[in-house]
Amino acid sequence: MSGRVDFGKLRHVVLSAKQPMKRSIAATFTCLLLASRLASAQDLSPSTEKPDRYAWGGWISLMLTNHAVAAFDAASTRRSIMAGNHEENPLDQPFVHSNSLYVITQLGPLIPDTLALLMLRSERKWLRQLWWLPQMANIFFTGWNGIHNIRISQ
């Protein structure tokens, strides 16, 4: 990604959205953009024993984005259920009609977050360089599920 990102304009777009779902989508993509900028700033040289500050900041930003996208998925799932659709995930089916859905969806990102942290602290160089992959994959697929839920509920 080249060029500078004006986060003031992105904040204005998020806050000017009238509908809560559009605001949630705009906030999610703003978090994704910010996380990708922070993750690209990381520099792990082969001589370092422990991750540097930029890598930790990238991990934390991806963790926060991961959980924000999970909340977006839960909100879009709730919207889809209210529109008459049904949940196909057997692990989420008992929780779709209660507020515990939001808590359950926050448990899912813990697995890629923990895996990324283990990769970030690994002694193997190739694992330290790919530490961001589990979190980004989960962000992509969870975001795609949320967008799918919005499409089928309209």
Image (cartoon, helix red, strand yellow):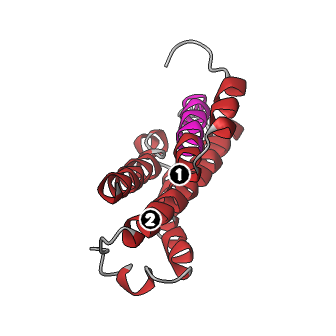
Q: Nearer the viewer, residue 92 or 152?
A: 152
Q: Residue at the bottom extreme?
A: 94
Residue drawn at x 56%, y 79% is 99
The label shown at residue 154 is none
Q: Amino acid at mark 2?
A: Arg
Residue drawn at x 44%, y 50% is 139
Q: Which range of residues does the magenta coloring cover?
A: 27-43
Residue drawn at x 46%, y 38% is 129
Residue indicated by mark 2 = 79
Q: Main secondary structure of the magenta part?
A: helix
Helix, strand or loop at disc 1? helix
Helix, strand or loop at disc 2? helix
* As drawn, 77 above or below 134: below
Residue 51 visible within the image: no
* As drawn, 96 above or below 147: below
Q: Is residue 133 magenta?
A: no
Looking at the image, residue 127 sits to the left or right of residue 4; the answer is left
Counting from the top left corner in percent of width and height, residue 73 is at 45, 60
Counting from the top left corner in percent of width and height, residue 20 is at 59, 52
The quadrant of the picture occupied by the C terminus is bottom left
- Marks 1/2 in contact by CB < 8 Å: the verdict is yes
Residue indicated by mark 1 = 21
For marks 1 and 2, give the CA distance.
9 Å
Looking at the image, residue 123 sits to the left or right of residue 52; the answer is left
Q: Nearer the viewer, residue 47 or 143?
A: 143
Q: Nearer the viewer, residue 96 or 90?
A: 96
Q: Bin the neighbour count of mark 2 within 10 Å (Cα to Cα): few under 14, some 14-19, many 20 and up.
A: some
Residue drawn at x 36%, y 82% is 93
* As drawn, 69 above or below 128: below
Counting from the top left corner in percent of width and height, residue 16 is at 66, 36
Q: Residue at the top extreme?
A: 3
Q: Nearer the viewer, residue 59 or 65?
A: 65
